[in-house]
Image (cartoon, helix red, strand yellow):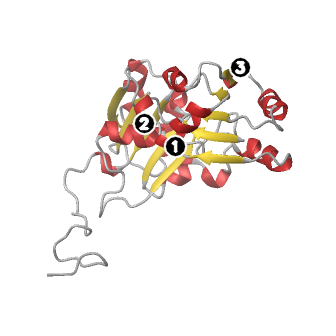
């Protein structure tokens, strides 16, 4: 049985109870060594075999699964954050389906959620933004033209950009197609890790601030009006004059 596990953003305490239970029962762990906190591996049985997938090609990872295909061993395939976002799990799932290998996906806390918590910011403020767009800059993995950052910026929603901080100058240049120079921006490096770092600014100065901080990887870029608004509409959910299924208007 293969379990694709989201190990969360870094803090071992953000591992879900279900993920912890599976890792504790695993015989084989294939983990993204360049991204997950190694302390998570400490909860695995001492005899469990450990493989660092950051040093492996897809074929090598699948070869381990193939070898154990007929066994009843639990394979914990541990990815960082939540595996549904840039987790590269779909090709592994396709292989499992083709080979009739039972599998299950265990969701995890995404790094963008941990970063939002670090920023102490709700990403969907009433009257300001009710849409969050998660994207990335085009790199070795191509981005469809319809999802170009410049086009996404025209929506002026809250934007979360993965895997792009090393090219932040290019990111900002594209974002100016829709956002103004004074649009609030923030960069969060290694959210929930002990060395977490937050850089705040606007599209006008965020590039220089990130360069000065020396951030080149493992960081998220946030852009949107929610990061600068001190006044906003109150949520209707807890408004005393708002009735719903569980609370009737008094």
The Cα atoms of the two marked residues, 1 and 2, are separated by 11 Å
Estimate the x, y position of residue 38 in percent, counting from the top left.
53, 21
Q: Nearer the viewer, mark 1 or mark 2?
A: 1
Q: Decide: marks 3, 1 in contact (CB < 8 A)?
A: no
- How many badges with numbers are in the image? 3
Q: Decide: marks 1, 2 in contact (CB < 8 A)?
A: no
- Along the line of sight, the residue nearer the viewer: 4 or 114: 4
Mark 3 or mark 2: whose residue is earlier in sequence: 2
Q: Residue furthest left?
A: 250
Asked which secondary structure carries label 2, the reply is helix
Q: Badge 3: few (under 14), some or many (20 or more) residues near its Cα, within 10 Å?
A: few
Occupied quadrant, residue 26: top right
The residue positioned 51% from the left and 43% from the top of the image is 18
Q: Decide: marks 3, 2 in contact (CB < 8 A)?
A: no
Asked which secondary structure carries label 3, the reply is helix
- Asked whether residue 109 appears in the rendered view, the answer is no
User: Circle 2 sits on which residue?
Assistant: 14
User: Is 115 left, or right, of 84 in this rendering?
Assistant: left
Asked which secondary structure carries label 1, the reply is helix
Occupied quadrant, residue 22: top right
The vertical placement of 119 against 47, above or below, is below
Quadrant for the N terminus, please: top right
Q: Badge 1: few (under 14), some or many (20 or more) residues near its Cα, within 10 Å?
A: few
The Cα atoms of the two marked residues, 3 and 2, are separated by 25 Å
Estimate the x, y position of residue 177 in percent, counting from the top left.
49, 49
User: Is 122 left, or right, of 24 in this rendering?
Assistant: left
User: Circle 3 sits on which residue?
Assistant: 55
Q: Nearer the viewer, mark 3 or mark 2?
A: 2
Q: Badge 2: few (under 14), some or many (20 or more) residues near its Cα, within 10 Å?
A: some
User: Circle 1 sits on which residue?
Assistant: 18
């Amino acid at each position: 049985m293969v379990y694709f596990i989201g190990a969360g953003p870094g803090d071992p305490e953000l591992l879900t109870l279900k993920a912890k239970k599976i890792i504790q029962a695993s015989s084989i762990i294939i983990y993204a060594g360049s991204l997950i906190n190694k302390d998570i591996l400490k909860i695995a049985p001492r005899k469990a075999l450990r493989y660092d997938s950051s040093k492996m090609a897809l074929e090598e990872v699948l070869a381990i699964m193939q070898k154990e295909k007929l066994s009843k061993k639990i394979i914990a395939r541990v990815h960082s954050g939540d595996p549904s976002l840039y987790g590269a799990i779909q090709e592994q799932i396709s292989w499992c389906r083709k080979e009739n290998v039972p599998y299950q996906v265990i969701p995890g806390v995404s790094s963008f959620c941990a970063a939002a918590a670090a920023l102490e910011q709700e990403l969907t403020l009433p009257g300001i933004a009710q849409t969050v767009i998660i994207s990335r800059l085009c790199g070795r993995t191509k981005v469809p033209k319809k999802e170009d950052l410049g086009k996404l910026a025209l929506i002026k929603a809250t934007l979360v950009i993965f895997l792009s901080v090393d090219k932040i100058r290019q990111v900002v240049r594209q974002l100016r197609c829709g956002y103004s120079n004074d649009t609030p921006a923030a960069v969060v490096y290694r959210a929930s890790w002990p060395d977490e770092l937050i850089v705040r600014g606007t599209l006008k100065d965020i590039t220089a601030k990130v360069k000065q901080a020396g951030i080149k990887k493992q960081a998220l870029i946030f852009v949107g009006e929610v990061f600068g608004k001190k006044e906003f509409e109150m949520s209707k959910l807890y408004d005393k004059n708002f009735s719903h299924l569980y609370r009737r208007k008094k």
